[in-house]
Amino acid sequence: MHAFSLDADHIAIRDMARAFADDRLAPRALEWDEKKHFPVDVIREAAALGMAAIYVREDVGGSAMTRFDAALIFEALSTGCPAVAAFVSIPVVNLATPLFGMAFMVHMHKRLSGPRPELLEPARKTSVPTR
């Protein structure tokens, strides 16, 4: 049976993501959730550290990492804030370009920021009778 272990690069990636989660995500995750806050600034910090555009080539602004690297990053980020980890993973999992990722971030920020009165309105009447 083959023994598995992380190499030095994988350990560095995991430790960097875990430190970010401990320092920048965990202390505020509950507050963000309670206030329905979308931490764009913190997600941009994660991106600046290479935790976005993970599969994109370096010559076009990506990190050129592997799926295994991504798994280490998302697992570590999840220890601080599963919502941020999930959000950061979406463009990566879909192999989206950095432009799509940014457009998606802007879209979600607009959806999650501020009051959403349309979500509180009663459902519109349908053609199906109810009793």
Image (cartoon, grey):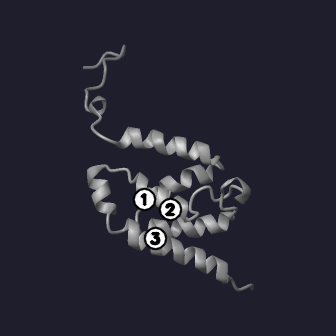
Callout 3, which amino acid?
Answer: Phe
Q: Is residue 6 visible in the rendered structure shown here? A: no
Q: CA distance from mark 1 to mark 3?
A: 10 Å
> What is the crowding at mark 1: few (fewer than 14 residues within 10 Å), some, or many (at least 20)?
some
| Residues under numbered marks 1 and 3 in contact, where contact means CB atoms less than 8 Å apart | no
What's the residue type where badge 2 is placed? Ala
- What residue is rendered at 34% in x and 42% in y? 113
Q: Is residue 25 above or below residue 108?
A: below
Q: Residue at x 69, y 64 (%)?
A: 66
- Marks 1 and 2 sit apart, C-alpha to C-alpha, by 6 Å
- Picture quarter with the C terminus: top left
In this view of the protein, which residue sits in the foreground, 66 or 52? 52
Q: Please, what secondary structure does the residue beneath circle 1 have?
A: helix
Q: How many C-alpha atoms fall within 10 Å of the one at disc 2: few (<14), some, or many (≥20)?
A: many
What residue is shown at x 55% (from left), y 56% (from top)? 89
- 20 left or right of 62 in image: left
